[in-house]
Image (cartoon, rainbow, N blue to C red):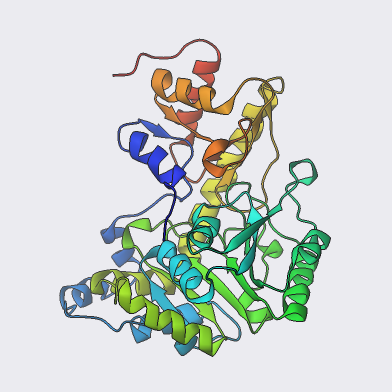
């Protein structure tokens, strides 16, 4: 397998830990281990007694039960716990796709959702979101893109990087097309439960379609990327078994302390998600005001879910704009080219409490008041 460099990760490797303000983070405000343990009386003592031997390769049974509780039709044995979401993507692509296969992928996208498929020799058709229609997807395009060699459709809702939340009727149409053609539906749902209006929340794809795979992770909505715990949930027994066997060549099993803390987090996931939703909504109001003050510079579409959005410059290139901003003002944004999506858009993140300071630094930069960076 040959994979191109992961553009987002290479960009972050250059700036993430040396830049004062990360105004493009895809995760939400995190907590300490002490914060997490305080949510659950007795958890601190239980953590002290946690056995540090090997864990079950499919995931700790209690953790899988907690994950299954997030779904309507999925049992614990239909959950497979991974090291973050990336491992789940990699495993799925490897067991399903090979040379000559075809997959349709929601675009723009997190690079591994298409890159791993291409690296395996599969052909990828981008299913383009329309920025002029609120990043909407056209189901008729999907129907026309299906070939005899098509194995899967890959979607992401709520969407990275645009914050688009697929309407229920569109999701139903996607599932109808997948079912009609016998396709697997892989749905990246890592921002689920961070809808800005909880009434807009979609059912998980694995609850609606017997050949769907739902991808989840603790990193985004719940703000716990340091635990490195993600999962897939699917009612497709054969696909689940193949992914479980393939995981033997990856991490084999997860870290016992991470699984313990992940279970605590999921028991209290609503409190964690609501805390971050409040931060997101407060910050979105600030962003609305910021972009309203600069209509000649930026095109802004308020997202409906998640902690990120994908505004555009009205003139100039995003790559140069982002480079100038990080080097002169110490504020990091992500240019759209890391998504292979031209040079106008950039990703902005608003899931962290320091957004007011970061946004003030950005506005100072726009007004010619950048501060010299070390």
Percent of width and height locating residue 152 = 63, 71
Q: Can residue 128 be seen in this view?
A: yes
Left of 59 or right of it: where is 346? Answer: right
Task: Specify the quadrant of the image occupied by residue 66.
Answer: bottom left
Residue located at (56% from left, 44% from top) = 339
Residue located at (57% from left, 37% from top) = 336
Q: Is residue 204 visible?
A: no
Front residue of 357 and 311 = 311
Front residue of 72 and 53 = 53
Residue placed furthest toward the top: 368
Percent of width and height locating residue 270 = 50, 67
- What quarter of the picture does the C terminus occupy? top left
Left of 30 or right of it: where is 346? Answer: right
Task: Specify the quadrant of the image occupied by residue 229.
Answer: bottom left
- What quarter of the picture does the N terminus occupy? bottom left
Percent of width and height locating residue 367 = 55, 12
Residue placed furthest toward the front: 100
Percent of width and height locating residue 45 = 19, 75
Residue placed furthest toward the right: 140
Relative height, residue 51 to residue 220 (above, below): below
Query: Number of labelled discs?
Result: 0
Relative height, residue 159 to residue 99 (above, below): above
Front residue of 57 and 61 = 57
Left of 316 or right of it: where is 218? Answer: left
Residue located at (59% from left, 34% from top) = 286
Front residue of 266 and 271 = 266
């Amino acid at each position: 397998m040959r994979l191109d460099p992961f553009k987002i990760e290479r960009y972050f490797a250059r700036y993430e830990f040396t830049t004062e303000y990360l105004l493009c983070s895809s995760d939400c405000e995190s907590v300490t281990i002490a914060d997490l343990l305080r949510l659950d009386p007795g958890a601190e003592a239980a953590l002290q007694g946690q056995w540090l031997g090997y864990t079950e390769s499919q995931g700790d049974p209690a953790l899988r039960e907690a994950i299954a509780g997030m779904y309507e039709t999925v049992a614990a044995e239909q959950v497979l716990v991974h090291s973050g979401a990336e491992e789940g993507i990699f495993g799925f692509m490897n067991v399903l796709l090979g040379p000559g296969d075809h997959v349709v992928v929601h675009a723009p996208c997190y690079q591994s959702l298409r890159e791993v498929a291409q690296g395996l020799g599969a052909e990828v058709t981008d299913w383009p979101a329309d920025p002029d229609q609120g990043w909407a997807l056209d189901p008729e395009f999907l129907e026309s893109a299906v070939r005899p060699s098509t194995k899967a459709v890959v979607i992401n809702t709520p969407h990275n990087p645009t914050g688009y939340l697929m309407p229920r009727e569109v999701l139903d149409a996607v599932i109808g097309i997948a079912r009609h053609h016998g396709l697997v539906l892989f749905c990246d749902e890592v921002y689920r439960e961070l809808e800005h209006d909880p009434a807009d929340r979609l059912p998980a794809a694995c609850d609606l379609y017997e050949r769907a795979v739902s991808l989840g992770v603790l990193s985004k909505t719940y703000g716990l990327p340091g635990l490195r715990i993600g999962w897939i949930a699917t009612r497709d027994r054969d696909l689940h078994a193949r992914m479980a066997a393939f995981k033997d060549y990856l991490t084999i099993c997860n870290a016992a302390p991470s699984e313990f803390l992940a279970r605590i987090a999921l028991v209290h996931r609503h409190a964690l998600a609501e805390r971050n939703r409040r931060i997101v909504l407060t910050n979105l109001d600030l962003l609305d005001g910021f972009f309203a003050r600069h209509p000649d510079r930026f095109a802004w579409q308020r997202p409906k879910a998640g902690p990120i959005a994908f505004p555009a410059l009205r003139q100039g290139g995003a790559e140069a704009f982002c480079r100038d901003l990080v080097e002169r003002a110490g504020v990091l944004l992500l240019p759209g080219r890391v998504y292979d999506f031209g040079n106008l858009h950039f990703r902005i993140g608003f899931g962290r409490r320091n957004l007011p300071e970061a946004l003030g630094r950005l506005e100072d930069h726009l007004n010619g008041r950048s501060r010299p960076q070390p």
